Image (cartoon, rainbow, N blue to C red):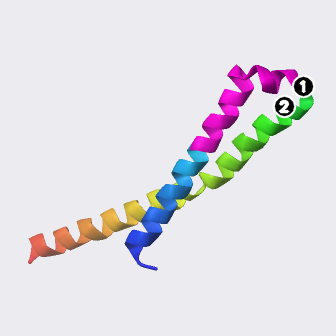
């Protein structure tokens, strides 16, 4: 897998996770159907948030990857400037 494909996959996972978190919050705060379901509705909205949090974990990997790439580029610039 190339770096571009990895970054695209991580972005997709992050966006999907954020969407799941949003769905869970919407269900919990604004959905009368979920509120009428009682504990089951709370479990459903909580499951959306939990799955979204798990799917947004690649955010850390993505940011680390970007920062490492930035450091490599900075080192190259410093080496070129010193030559």
Measured in 3D between alpha carbons, the distance from the residue under mark 1 to the one under mark 2, in whole angstroms, is 5 Å
> In the picture provided, is 47 more to the left or to the right than 21?
right
The answer to whether residue 78 is magenta is no
Residue identified by numbered label 1: 38
How dense is the environment of label 1, judged by Cα within 10 Å: few (below 14), some, or many (20 and up)? few
What is the chief secondary structure element of the magenta stretch? helix
Residue 62 at x, y percent in the picture: 47, 60
Q: Residue 37 or 77: which is nearer the viewer?
A: 37
Please state the extent of the stretch shown in magenta in the rendering: 19-38
Q: How many marks?
A: 2
Q: Secondary structure at mark 1?
A: loop
Q: Residue at x 41, y 78 (%)?
A: 2
Q: Is residue 8 above or below residue 22?
A: below
> In the picture provided, is 73 more to the left or to the right than 13?
left
The reply to whether the C-beta atoms of the residues labelled 1 and 2 are less than 8 Å apart is yes
Residue 52 at x, y percent in the picture: 66, 47
Q: Residue at x 46, y 80 (%)?
A: 1
In which quarter of the view is residue 39 placed?
top right
> In the picture provided, is 20 more to the left or to the right than 74?
right
Residue 65 at x, y percent in the picture: 43, 65
Q: Which mark is residue 1?
A: none
Residue 80 at x, y percent in the picture: 12, 74
Q: Residue at x 50, y 64 (%)?
A: 9
Q: Residue 76 or 22: which is nearer the viewer?
A: 22
How dense is the environment of label 2, judged by Cα within 10 Å: few (below 14), some, or many (20 and up)? some
Q: Secondary structure at mark 2?
A: helix
Residue identified by numbered label 2: 41
Q: Residue 66 or 55: which is nearer the viewer?
A: 55
Q: Residue at x 43, y 71 (%)?
A: 5
């Amino acid at each position: 897998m190339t770096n571009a494909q990895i970054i695209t996959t991580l972005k997709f996972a992050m966006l999907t996770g954020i969407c799941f978190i949003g769905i869970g919050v919407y269900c919990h705060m604004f959905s009368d159907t979920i509120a009428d379901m009682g504990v089951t509705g709370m479990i459903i909205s909580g499951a959306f948030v939990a799955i979204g949090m798990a799917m947004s974990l690649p955010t850390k990997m993505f940011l680390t990857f970007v920062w490492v790439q930035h450091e490599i580029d900075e080192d190259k610039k410093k080496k070129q400037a010193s030559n």
